[in-house]
Every structure is written in structure tokens, then in C-alpha cells.
């Protein structure tokens, strides 16, 4: 069963990586245009961010992919603390009908 | 008033940031409650706020990935996510999505794509809405008959039970999904996810709108587990979508972060609301959301059929979608607050009684 699971996991990862067309979104595909961000309007981290975008979409994408789940996780944990303090039980749900 | 506007570093447009937060809260509530990404609501909203369409889509997906992660975490704690089912379905969804996308290419070549896609979308939404309300009415009829027979109404009774027929298929391997409380052939979720992925690929949507009812009516998941498992899939595909759109340079992370601030609160509220609203309550609200979505698509089609009044129809469709988001968020938010208040009051009363 464990072997079957590892095979399944491998298949899931492989399919997800080998099918780059699978994009979750409404609307048409992005046009092959090159967009350049105007760095002159910014200073500090914003200037760094726009420069990164202009220099390498790959690094820009990698950083975005790291930041999004991290921020999501952080907000989730903060909310956990807040809701526990309010007194909401986050571990049980009474009714689970079909 | 400059304080309320922020210049987006990549898109280069000034955006009213409280609008982003409000949109994030609204779609977070709805997404966490119904188990969907909600691209059909956010993309027009971002477009109205001033984002070019390409950035609107990429930014929407980026915030959706973060928001779905928050909701999945919360649903996971309630025991609403069947990870095994989600992973198996992911395979079918990805393959089906690709086949659907190839079909769209073929339709594009014969120049009929937009017409067929909109009609298919409308037909599909009508079928989903009909199924949901037929299910609700069947459950009510069953409950009435049970009452008339002098028996006690089962709190877990259901209306439509197509999954029971599908569970009679015993092609190996048979799999048990603990969280979903069901055992069926592995081919059933694979086939269903392939079909829903195929439809999502053709329609160019994420698929939560189709997958959630499919999980309930064809696989046999309890409503809450369907919502949680669907969000798990949305989270994975959302991260993938973020990677591809960002690599193409079409994501505005600053906007996604601002939206995520609102969506984090909204997603929590929507997810916790599922604790206080019964499965059939979720189904009724979902059915109404689907009807609203179908009407907005119809209005968009009418804008094409009657170009002289196109602006009016398009505007009405956008107002309808945003109005729907506001009304649903309000209903879910109030339900969550009232439920939480009742729970806290009950806890306090219990402690007082113990003393």
C-alpha cells in the first residue's frame, strides 16, 4: 500500500510538472508581450522589486512562489491564535451530514 | 486622497487599495465557504479597479493560492479535507484540463470557440443549479414523508443519491477515503475529476464551481468534506498557476499581498461559517450563487447579440457579480458571527454551571 502511495505521489508530481498548460484561471492566455516595469518611479524595496522583474522573470517567479504560501501560512497561524483567544473551537464540528 | 491609492510597481497603475482589501474579504469569505477559487468574481473586480486584464488574471491566481492555503489549513483542522481523494483527483483534473484546453484550440481553428464556450458554460450552470435545487426539494419531500409516517427525521438524510448507484461499480482497486467516509473504485474519482477537469479546460475556469457539486453528487462526499477537498485542489493548482503567470510577468505581487490581507480574514470567516451552517444550507447558498453566475453570463452573451446596448448589459453583469459577492459575504459573515457568539455563550454557560 505504501509503495502504491509513493507511485501515486510520483505520478501526481510528474503530471503537474510535465503539463505546463494547466493553469487555474478564467480568461484567455497571456499574450507573448514583453512588459518592462518603470523603475524610475520607485526607491528602496520597490525599486529592487521592479529591477528584479526586469532582469529575470525566473527569479521573480521563484520569489513570488515562495512569498505567497509563506504569507498565507503566516496569516493562517495568526488567525489561529486570534480565534482561539476569542474562544472559537477550531478542532470540532458537530454536524457532518451529506 | 492620495493615501488611498498605491502605485503598482509592475503594472504601473494607481490602484485604490481599500477596494483590493474589500474584494479580498468578499472573495475570501465565499471561497472558504463554498470551496472555490472564485476567479469569475475577482477578475472583473480587479479590472474595474484599474488592472489590465492580463495582470488581473495573474494577480487573482496569486492571491487565490495564498487564500486557498489558509482555508485548506482551517478545513483540515475541522477534518474537512480528504487529502488522499484530493491527490487522486488532481491526476484526473490535470489530464482532463489539458484535453479540454486542446479541444479549445481545435474550436479556435474552426472559429467557433467563444460561442460554444459561453453556451456550454450556461448549460452547465443551469444543470448544476437544477441539480442542487432538485436535491433540496427531494430531501424536503423525504423528510415530510418521514414525519407523516410518524417517524423521527434523520439529521443526516439526503435528497439525490446518485453516488450510491456509482458506488455499486466494483472495478479494482477499491479505495477507502476515511475523511469522506466512503469506499469506491479508484476509477470513480479519476473519471469524475477527468470530466470536471475537461470541462474546466474548455471553459477556461479553475473548476471549483463544477468540482464541488461533483464531489457531493457523484463521489458521495459530505458537503463539508467536498468544500475542504476542493480547496486543497484549488490550492495546488493555484500555486502552479501563480508560477506560470508570474514567469510570464503577469503577476502584481503587491496587489496580491494587499488582497491577501483581506482574503485571510475573509477565508477564516467563510471556513469557520461552515461549522455553524448545515450542509444543506451551504448547498442552497451555492445554488443561488450559481444562478447569479449564470445570469451574468447570459447578460454578457446579450451584450454580444445586441451591440447597441452592449455597455448596459456588460455593466449590469458586473454589478450583478459584485452585488452577489457582497450579498453572499454579508450572509456568510453574519452567520459566522452569530454562530461564534452562540458557541462562546454556550461555553460560558457550561463553565458557570460547573462552578
Image (cartoon, coloured by chain):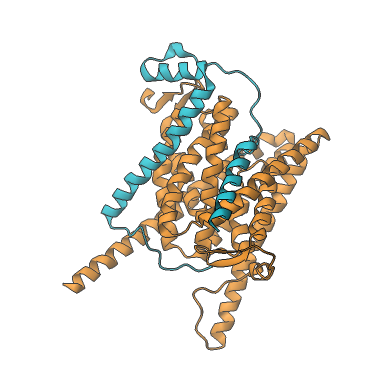
Q: Which chain is cyan?
A: A
Q: Quadrant of the C terminus of chain B?
A: bottom left
Q: Which chain is orange?
A: B
Report whether residue B118 is seen. Answer: yes
Q: Residue at x 61, y 46 (%)?
A: A11
**How many labels were placed on the picture?**
0
Can you give x and y, in whole percent of width and height, for residue B251 in the image?
52, 28
Using the rendered view, name the quadrant where residue B204 is placed.
top right
- Asked whether B83 or B135 is in front, the reply is B83
Using the rendered view, name the quadrant where residue A47 is placed.
top left
Using the rendered view, name the quadrant where residue B113 is placed.
top right
Q: Residue at x 56, y 67 (%)?
A: B182
Residue placed furthest toward the front? A3
Can you give x and y, in whole percent of width and height, for residue B190 in the image?
65, 55
Q: Residue at x 46, y 21 (%)?
A: B9
Residue placed furthest toward the top? A40
Q: Quadrant of the N terminus of chain B?
A: top left
Can you give x and y, in whole percent of width and height, for residue A15 in the image?
63, 42
- Asked whether B245 or B347 is in front, the reply is B245
Q: Residue at x 51, y 49 (%)?
A: B232
Amino acid at each position: 500500500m505504501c509503495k502504491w502511495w509513493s507511485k501515486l505521489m510520483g505520478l501526481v508530481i510528474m503530471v503537474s510538472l510535465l503539463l505546463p498548460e494547466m493553469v487555474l484561471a478564467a480568461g484567455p492566455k497571456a499574450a507573448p508581450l514583453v512588459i518592462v516595469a518603470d523603475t524610475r518611479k520607485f526607491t528602496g524595496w520597490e525599486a529592487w522589486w521592479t529591477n528584479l522583474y526586469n532582469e529575470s522573470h525566473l527569479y521573480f517567479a521563484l520569489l513570488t512562489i515562495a512569498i505567497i504560501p509563506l504569507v498565507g501560512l503566516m496569516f493562517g497561524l495568526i488567525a489561529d491564535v486570534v480565534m482561539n483567544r476569542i474562544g472559537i473551537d477550531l478542532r470540532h464540528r458537530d454536524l457532518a451530514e451529506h | 486622497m492620495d493615501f488611498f491609492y498605491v502605485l503598482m510597481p509592475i503594472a504601473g497603475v494607481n490602484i485604490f487599495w481599500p477596494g483590493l482589501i474589500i474584494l479580498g474579504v468578499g472573495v475570501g469569505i465565499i471561497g472558504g465557504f463554498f470551496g472555490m477559487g472564485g476567479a469569475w468574481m475577482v477578475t472583473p473586480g480587479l479590472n474595474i479597479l484599474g488592472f489590465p486584464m492580463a495582470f488581473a488574471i495573474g494577480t487573482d491566481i496569486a492571491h487565490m493560492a495564498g487564500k486557498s492555503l489558509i482555508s485548506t489549513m482551517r478545513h483540515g483542522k475541522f477534518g474537512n479535507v480528504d487529502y488522499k481523494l484530493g491527490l487522486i483527483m488532481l491526476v484526473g483534473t490535470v489530464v482532463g484540463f489539458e484535453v479540454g484546453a486542446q479541444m479549445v484550440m481545435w474550436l479556435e481553428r474552426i472559429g467557433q470557440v467563444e460561442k460554444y464556450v459561453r453556451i456550454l458554460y450556461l448549460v452547465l450552470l443551469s444543470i448544476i443549479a437544477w441539480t442542487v435545487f432538485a436535491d433540496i426539494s427531494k430531501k424536503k419531500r423525504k423528510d415530510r414523508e418521514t414525519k407523516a409516517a410518524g417517524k423521527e427525521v434523520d439529521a443526516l438524510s439526503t435528497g439525490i443519491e446518485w453516488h450510491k448507484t456509482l458506488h455499486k461499480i466494483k472495478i479494482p482497486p477499491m479505495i477507502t477515503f476515511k475523511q469522506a467516509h466512503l469506499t469506491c473504485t479508484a476509477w470513480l474519482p479519476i473519471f469524475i475529476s477527468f470530466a470536471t477537469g475537461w470541462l474546466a479546460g474548455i471553459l477556461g475556469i479553475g473548476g471549483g464551481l463544477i468540482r464541488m457539486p461533483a464531489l457531493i453528487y457523484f463521489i458521495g462526499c459530505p458537503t463539508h468534506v467536498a468544500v475542504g477537498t476542493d480547496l486543497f485542489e484549488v490550492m495546488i493548482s493555484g500555486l502552479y498557476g501563480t508560477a506560470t503567470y508570474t514567469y510570464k510577468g503577469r503577476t502584481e505581487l503587491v496587489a496580491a499581498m494587499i488582497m491577501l490581507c483581506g482574503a485571510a480574514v475573509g477565508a477564516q470567516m467563510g471556513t469557520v461559517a461552515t461549522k455553524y451552517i448545515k450542509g444543506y444550507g451551504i448547498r442552497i447558498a451555492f445554488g443561488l450563487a450559481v444562478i447569479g453566475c449564470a445570469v451574468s453570463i447570459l447578460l454578457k452573451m446579450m451584450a454580444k447579440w445586441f451591440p447597441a446596448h452592449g455597455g448596459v448589459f456588460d455593466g449590469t453583469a458586473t454589478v450583478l457579480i459584485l452585488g452577489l459577492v457582497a450579498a453572499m459575504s454579508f450572509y456568510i459573515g453574519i452567520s459566522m458571527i452569530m454562530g461564534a457568539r452562540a458557541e462562546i455563550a454556550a461555553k460560558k454557560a457550561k463553565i458557570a454551571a460547573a462552578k
